[in-house]
Image (cartoon, rainbow, N blue to C red):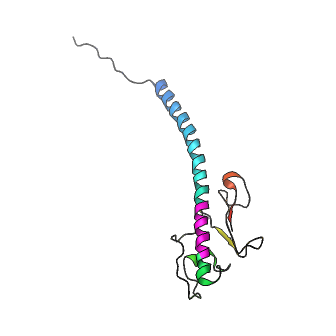
Amino acid sequence: MTPQRRERGFTLMELLAVIVIIGVLAATIGSRFLGQTEKAKVGAAKTEMGQMVQALDLFKLENGRYPNAQEGLEALIKNPGNLPNWSGPYLRKDNIKDPWNNDYKYTVPGPNNTPFELKSLGADGKEGGEGENADIVKN
């Protein structure tokens, strides 16, 4: 006689319990990382905007003025055609978008007698907001 072998395995209830536990852990950990991702994007936008301000200052130093409204930030990448002292590109990127893939807003002249204003509209892409939706402004 051969001894009976007992099959071992997991019951459906045990598998469902494990799946629920993994789901709860993933939701908890995922929500923490999502908040960190948005903070990182805000930091990246501030860093990029600081680099653009430096590029705008170098543009002015070489050309005697900041790019006008028609030239915009594209003048930091390509010579608009009428600037003999242009020695760019002043930025290493070909695409001038914020971390949320929205265009940076460049206004000439800026408010309060500033030469320009550089703005990211934040995660929501709309004026105003709070937290990660808040506008980030440099001038």
Q: Is residue 59 left or right of 113 when viewed as pictured?
A: left
Chain part drawn in magenta: 46-57
Residue 70 vs 111, above or below: the answer is below
Q: Residue at x 69, y 63 (%)?
A: 137
Q: Can residue 100 be seen?
A: no
Which residue reaches farthest top?
1
Q: Nearer the viewer, residue 57 or 25?
A: 57
Where, by quadrant of the figure, is residue 60 drawn?
bottom right
Q: Main secondary structure of the magenta part?
A: helix
Q: Position of residue 120 (x, y in %)?
A: 66, 63
Residue 2 vs 81, above or below: the answer is above
Which residue reaches farthest right?
112
Q: Is residue 114 left or right of 4 when viewed as pictured?
A: right
Q: Residue 52 magenta-drawn?
A: yes
Q: Position of residue 29 (x, y in %)?
A: 55, 39
**Which image quadrant: the C terminus?**
bottom right
